[in-house]
Image (cartoon, rainbow, N blue to C red):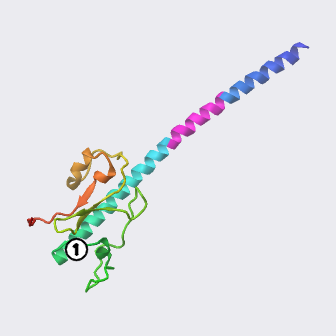
Amino acid sequence: MSNGEGARRGARGFTYLGLLVLVALIGLMLSAASEVVSTVAQREREAQLLWVRHEYRAAIGRFWIRNHKFPQMLEELVGSAPDAPIQVRYIRRLYPDPMTNAVDWVLVKAPNDAIMGIASSSTRAPLKTGHFDDADQDFADAKAYSDWQFTYVPVGVRWKP
């Protein structure tokens, strides 16, 4: 065996080791990047969830102002309730829950068993824990998205037991 042949064998081993280290580093970087992408996607779904819930809250408020009662079902907000005498749209459509991607809202009931708000059915822990609107300040202590309850409470109305 000549000196040149032994040097080439050693170089092949070093190249192989370097390639293994490079593959491991690429794997670590891809893992970190996927975690960042996942966090960004969840923050976007949180922002969408806050927007959708505010739309539902506002629609329930408009329904209350016009009818002086809460809706019995969400379909009344889009004007598709079967027994409604006048079809009025308070919201464009029934938006899905961005966390579950379905219209599977948990309904927050008023004392008369009507709907005064909604909440997500997701039990996932929220990333956002502060800097909420004034009406949503109690969301800072939420342990899950289902704790973010968006309700409309009319000003000056007392509930009858």
Which residue lies most toward the bottom here?
85
- For residue 87, above or below residue 100: below
Q: Which residue is mark 1?
A: 63
Q: Residue furthest right?
A: 1
Quarter-of-image position of residue 111: bottom left
Image: 102 above or below 145? below
Residue that appears at 28% across and 81% down: 88
Q: Which residues are magenta?
A: 21-34
* Residue type indicated by callout 1: Phe
Task: Find residue 7 and report its horizontal and vertical position in percent.
Answer: 82, 17
At 79% from the left and 24% from the top, the residue drawn is: 12
For disc 1, the neighbor class at 10 Å (few under 14, some 14 to 19, many from 20) is many
Residue 41 in the image: x percent, y percent? 45, 50
Q: Residue 14: where, in percent of width, then height?
A: 73, 22
* Corner quadrant of residue 160: bottom left
Classified by dominant secondary structure, the portion drawn in magenta counts as: helix
Which structural element holds mark 1? helix
Residue under the image location 28 percent in, 53 percent down: 148
Q: Nearer the viewer, residue 101 or 83?
A: 83
How many numbered badges does the structure rendering display? 1
Residue at image location 44% in from the left, 48% down from the top: 40
Q: In the picture, which quadrant includes the N terminus?
A: top right
Classify the position of the C terminus by image quarter: bottom left
> Residue 16 appears at what percent x and percent y?
73, 27
